[in-house]
Amino acid sequence: AQSVSQHNHHVILSEAASLELGCNYSYGGTVNLFWYVQYPGQHLQLLLKYFSGDPLVKGIKGFEAEFIKSKFSFNLRKPSVQWSDTAEYFCAVRGYYKLSFGAGTTVTVRA
Amino acid sequence: DAGVIQSPRHEVTEMGQEVTLRCKPISGHNSLFWYRQTMMRGLELLIYFNNNVPIDDSGMPEDRFSAKMPNASFSTLKIQPSEPRDSAVYFCASSTSGTRGSTDTQYFGPGTRLTVL
C-alpha cells in the first residue's frame, strides 16, 4: 500500500521568506509524485508533478520540488513567498491509478 | 476548457434525506474519481471509474453511498439516507487514463460542500 507523510502541519512565515515543505512517501514500485495547492475556499490545483527524468521539477508560481529516491522524499520549495501563497499544500503519490494524499500543510504568509 | 464541473457547490440537508452530487468530467477524460475531504481524515478516494466502469469502490464508506457513471460525461454520487457524519467536501476529479505507467494528471473540480444537520 502507498502512503504519504507530510511533516509540517502548519507553517507561518513572513513575505520574502523561503519555504520548504517536507514530504515522504512509502511505495514499493515506480511512483508518480505530485504537489497540489488548495487556496482558501477553492479546489485543488496542480502545482507540479514528477514522473521520471530530472529529479528537480519546476512548477507554477515559482515552486519547485526535488525527488530524492534514496530518501523517498519529494520536498517542495519556494525561495521567496508572497502573501498570495497562503494556502494548504498537499503532497500525493500515485502507484497505479490511486492518488494517496498527505494530511496537508497549511501555510500562512504574513504581509 | 471548462474544467471539471460539480453541482451543487453547497448542499445543506437534514439527516435521513437523500443527497445526490453531480460531476461532469473534462471532455476526453476517461477516468473519474470521487474524493471526500474532512478535517479528521483528509482527502480520501471513494471510488474510481475507468471508461464508465467502476474499478475500485473500496473507499466507499458503507451501503448508504452509491455512485454511477451512465456515460462518459456524467457521474453521480448518492448518499441515502444521509447522516451528520457525512458532512464534508466532496471532490470529483478526472484524468485521461487510469492505467499503470501512464502520465496522466488528475484535475479536480471545485467540490460540493455538504452539510447534514
Image (tube, grey):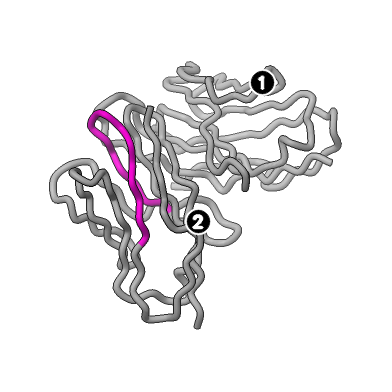
Residue A74: horizontal and vertical position, in percent?
Answer: 29, 50
Residue under label 1: B62
Q: Nearer the viewer, mark 1 or mark 2?
A: 1
Secondary structure beneath disc 2? strand
* Left or right of residue B65, residue A19 in this image: left
Residue under label 2: A38
Secondary structure beneath disc 1? loop
- For badge 2, the amino acid type reads Gln
Q: Provide the chain ID for the residue under circle 2.
A: A
The residues tagged by marks 1 and 2 sit, at their Cα atoms, a distance apart of: 28 Å
Report the span colored magenta.
Answer: A21-36
* Left or right of residue B59, residue A16 in this image: left
- For badge 1, the amino acid type reads Glu
Identified at 32% across, 59% down, the residue is A76
In the rendered structure, does residue B91 fall within the stretch colored magenta?
Answer: no
| Position of B60 relative to A12 (above/below) | above
